[in-house]
Image: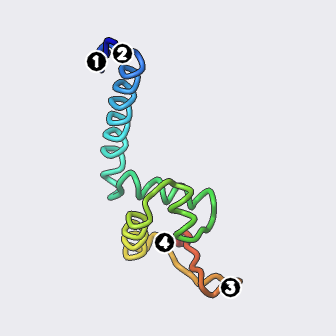
Amino acid sequence: MKIKTAMTHPDLQVLEYFGRFRRALNLHFTNALRPLGLGVKQASLLHFLSRRGKASQAELSRDTLTDPAAMTRLVNLLLREGALRQREDPTDKRRWVLALTP
C-alpha cells in the first residue's frame, strides 16, 4: 500500500489551504482590531454578548467553544477593563451572569 504525502493527497491539500486561510483571516482581524485595543477573542466575546444579551461564564465557554480556563482569563480582563459587568443571577444564587456594560 502506497501512502500519499500531504502535498499530494487532495484531502490534506484542502486542509492545508484551510489552515492558511484561517491564519490569514486571523491576521487580518488582529490588525483591524489593534487600534481598538482588542484581540480577536475579546471582540468575538463582546459580539456574542451583544447578540445574546447575557450569559454565564460556563455558557460562554460552551457556546463559543473556548476552554474554561481561557474564558476565565478573558472574562477577568474584560471585567477589569470595564467592558463587562457581572451580576448574581436572581433565580440562582450560585450562578453569575455576564453582560456588556451600558
Q: Amino acid at mark 1?
A: Thr
Whether residues under marks 4 and 3 lie with C-beta atoms below 8 angstroms apart, the answer is no
The x, y position of residue 10, in whole percent, is: 40, 15
List the single residue furthest toward the front.
Answer: 1
Q: What is the number of the mark on residue 5?
A: 1
Q: Residues within 10 Å of mark 1 (few under 14, many from 20)?
A: few
**Along the polypeptide, which appears first: circle 1 or circle 3?**
1
Q: Is 80 situated left or right of 58 in this image?
A: left
The x, y position of residue 65, in whole percent, is: 49, 53
**Along the polypeptide, which appears first: circle 3 or circle 2?**
2
Q: Which residue is label 3 attached to? A: 90
Q: Amino acid at mark 3?
A: Pro
Q: Residue at x 44, y 65 (%)?
A: 68
Look at discs 1 and 3 and give the one toward the viewer: 1
Q: Residue at x 35, y 54 (%)?
A: 39
Along the line of sight, the residue nearer the viewer: 88 or 36: 88
Quadrant where the C terminus sits is bottom right
The x, y position of residue 5, in whole percent, is: 28, 18
Whether residues under marks 2 and 1 lie with C-beta atoms below 8 angstroms apart, the answer is yes
Q: Amino acid at mark 2?
A: His
**Along the polypeptide, which appears first: circle 4 or circle 3?**
4
**Secondary structure at numbered mark 3:** loop
The x, y position of residue 75, in whole percent, is: 43, 69
Look at discs 3 and 2 and give the one toward the viewer: 2
Vertical comparison of 60 with 8: above or below: below
Q: Is 60 situated left or right of 34 in this image?
A: right
Please, which colouring scheme is shown? rainbow
Q: Amino acid at mark 4?
A: Leu
